[in-house]
Amino acid sequence: MESYITLGLVLLLSIIGHNMTVVYAAIIILVLKILSQITSQPIIVDWMGGHGLQLGIIILTAAVLVPIANGTVTIATMIHSFKSVAGVVAIVAGLLAAIAGGLGVPLMQENPDVIPALIIGTMAGVFFFKGIAVGPLIAAGFTYFVLAIIQHSK
């Protein structure tokens, strides 16, 4: 019952904060949870927990590749990105974000106790700073970086 209340609270706060991405995500999880209860098969929610992140990354990556598919981004514009400060910074930021995300997945798997804190931090960023809820994975990677620095400095 507690999970329904928590998901309902996330849904309510998302509606108040006008963050439709989180509204849709909360509704999807609530529906999947209800279906799992009705069918007595938690496999639906478990499947989402195990494969949802990968599916989301695939969809996000596909969306990012659309400008290449429709011709907005060409090889020439890609090469040009190496010639501007903003382009170089964006390349480095993309590199760091990819590394952070790659390190974040194992961190969440090995230390599931960080997941609630990542969710709280992401939700706070969404609600109070009009962020986008892609943060938990990258936040986990940044958490990994900070924990590695703390561990190394001991």
Image (tube, rainbow, N blue to C red):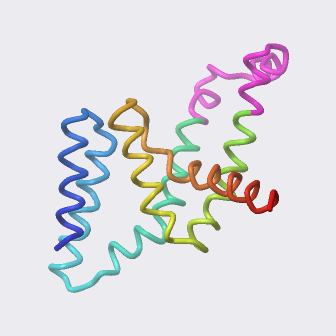
Residue 106, how many percent across, how many down?
A: 64, 67
Q: Please say if 59 is above or below 48.
A: above
Q: Is residue 23 left or right of residue 109?
A: left
Name the residue at the bottom extreme: 40
Span highlighted in magenta in the image: 65-92
Counting labels gives 0
Name the residue at the top extreme: 84
Q: Is residue 114 left or right of residue 48?
A: right
Q: Magenta part mainly helix, strand or loop?
A: helix
Name the residue at the front extreme: 154
Q: Please say if 98 is above or below 131.
A: below
Q: Is residue 32 left or right of residue 69?
A: left
Q: Quadrant of the C terminus?
A: bottom right
Q: Please say if 51 is above or below 67.
A: below
Q: Residue at x 80, y 16 (%)?
A: 80
Image quadrant in which you'd find residue 87: top right
Residue 84, how many percent across, how many down?
A: 80, 13
Q: Residue at x 39, y 76 (%)?
A: 46
Residue 117, how many percent across, how many down?
A: 45, 57
Residue 13, how many percent across, how many down?
A: 22, 43
Residue 103, magenta (yes or no): no
Q: Residue at x 77, y 33 (%)?
A: 92
Q: Please say if 35 is above or below 75.
A: below
Most foreground residue, 100 or 120: 120
Q: Quadrant of the N terminus?
A: bottom left
